[in-house]
Image: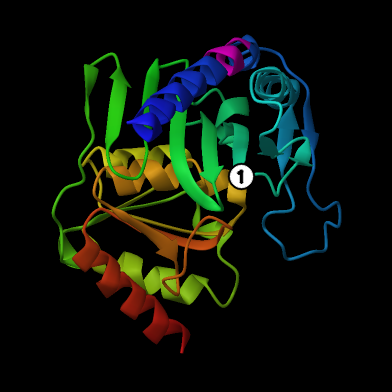
Amino acid sequence: MADMHQKHTYTDFAHRLADAAAAEALAGFRAAIHVDNKGKKDAASDDTRRYDPVTEADRGAERVMRELIETTYPDHGIVGEEYGKLRQDADHVWVLDPIDGTRSFIAGIPLWGTLIGLMENGRPALGMMAQPYIGERFYGDGKSARYRGPRGDGALKTRKCADLSDAILFTTTPALFDHDERPAYDAVEREVRLARYGTDCYGYCMLAAGQADLVIEAGLEAYDIVALVPIVEGAGGVVTTWTGAPADEGGRIVASGDPALHEAVLRELAICRA
């Protein structure tokens, strides 16, 4: 009972963090705002991720969340995209991406969100994706997941889809994949019913909501995925690396709504990369 009460407490706190971040993020959305590039400056590089935009909205949203965590849980750790790591070896570590989907953010497209994850003893235990412009929140604890937004409140549940030919696939962009990864991704995309790009964190939440079946990405950091794992798993889905390992450190990631589909996709990716 104490553990359940604590989970409710942390969920309530995640909502407080999302509220604080929302004010900072919305102030910069569809507004004149300076954009910096954190990525590689070498124009000759073949790294398609060398453009890595960041805005003051990203920084401001993370700052207010970190301040709230430090005030409320001073013994907890923090890992954030913009301001790095603090007490990373703590039993409880908050993993923050203040604006996941900054490219969409600076283009005025509302396919971005604030990611708030909580690691307990090294495993993702709680996650939330908050989209303040639309007013949606998706959150879960690995055992259940819920939605709050314009359509009301309710449980999230993935849908059955064991066959790739019936699947809807999301990825942020095929440019995520390097020359070794791209053929494997393309082979899977050729088999699905429908593929859509530009989804960032929203793809995982639509999978948890039963609107899609598969997300395949690469080059992710921990702050890109930790918050999404408890949401997808809580809705009945599976999230791993391409080799089936835990996803919480990022890298090459596969999320599936149906465990049978997940196994099929892992086999496909392994064959293509053999």
Q: How many marks?
A: 1
Identified by mark 1, the residue type is Asp
> For residue 162, what is the image quadrant?
bottom left
The residue tagged 1 is 91
Disc 1 crowd, CA 10 A, few/some/many (<14, 14-19, 20+): some
Q: Which residues are magenta?
A: 19-23
Q: Quadrant of residue 119?
A: top right
Q: Secondary structure at mark 1?
A: loop
Q: Is residue 6 magenta?
A: no
The residue under the point 29% across, 26% down is: 147
Give the main secondary structure of the magenta stretch: helix
Image position of 250 with respect to 65: above or below: below
- Image location of residue 114, percent across then percent down: 54, 28
Could you say where residue 246 lies in the image, as x and y percent from the top left?
A: 47, 63
Residue 252 locus on image (x, y percent):
52, 64
Vertical relation: 154 (above or below) 262: above
Measured from the top left, where is residue 87 in percent x and y?
Answer: 75, 42
